[in-house]
Amino acid sequence: MAPSFCASFFFSLSLAILWICPTYARLSVKVSENELKVICSSHEDPPFCLQALKSDPHTPLVDLVGLTNISIHLVDVAANKTLALIRSLIKTADPELKKHLDDCLEMYDITISETEDAKTALKAHDYETVNVASDSCMTNAETCTDTTTSAPPLQQENKHMRYLCETFVVVSNHLL
């Protein structure tokens, strides 16, 4: 009786390992050119998504987690650049526009904080938190876009930022 119990136990353990490993294996395999295209196909502007991700020289060498890290980095850099633009626009804005710019300033501060949270969550394999941060990034960029129609330079930066946030979203969706 003992030998059949051991055989059953090891068989069950083997099945469990085989069931769990493909999930982790999928995350740790280099992302191919075709997979990049599939990931970016759900983006509003797939060529933008591909170009943004390929702008990092590490893209051909990374797995899905690394690609997510690249998308977070792209958002972080753009958010800091846009934050600097907002700060410079506030200095010369009329009171009504200043109010909207202050709102955007807050949105971008939140985005930068959440990208830091996403980096921490990614290292901890907390992909749900990463995905929530990507969705928040989109919301923040859209909110700022909706409130600053009278600041054309910021409109362009917000559009760029929204596309980078969407890239972050489509990449992080593949972690789940």
Image (cartoon, rainbow, N blue to C red):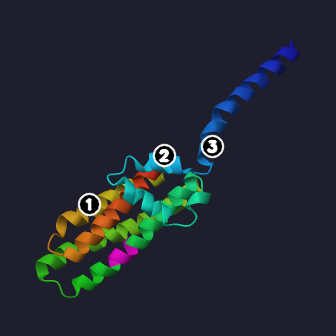
Majority secondary structure of magenta residues = helix
Q: Which residue is mark 1?
A: 142
Checking the image for residue 24, the label placed there is 3
For the residue labelled by badge 3, is the local secondary structure a helix, a strand or a loop? helix
Tags 2 and 1 touching, CB below 8 Å: no
Checking the image for residue 73, the label placed there is none
Residue 151 in view, yes or no: yes
Q: CA distance from mark 2 to mark 1?
A: 22 Å
Q: Which residue is mark 2?
A: 174
Q: Earlier in the sequence, mark 2 or mark 1?
A: 1
Query: Residue 76: image x %, image y %?
Result: 44, 69
On the rendered structure, is 141 left or right of 57?
left
Report the label total: 3
Quarter of the figure with residue 13: top right
Query: Residue 112: image x %, image y %?
Result: 41, 69
Tags 3 and 2 touching, CB below 8 Å: no
Q: Quadrant of the N terminus?
A: top right
Asked if the magenta segment contains residue 81, the reply would be: yes
For the residue labelled by badge 2, is the local secondary structure a helix, a strand or a loop? loop
Mark 2 nearby-residue class (10 Å; few <14, some 14–19, many ≥20)? some
Q: Earlier in the sequence, mark 1 or mark 3?
A: 3
Q: Residue at x 64, y 31 (%)?
A: 19
Q: Residue at x 37, y 77 (%)?
A: 81
Disc 2 marks which amino acid? His
Residue furthest to the top: 1
The span picked out in magenta is 79-83
143 vs 88: above or below: above
Q: Residue at x 19, y 74 (%)?
A: 152
Mark 3 nearby-residue class (10 Å; few <14, some 14–19, many ≥20)? few
Query: Residue 7: image x %, image y %?
Result: 82, 20
Q: CA distance from mark 3 to mark 2?
A: 12 Å
Asked if the magenta segment contains residue 150, the reply would be: no
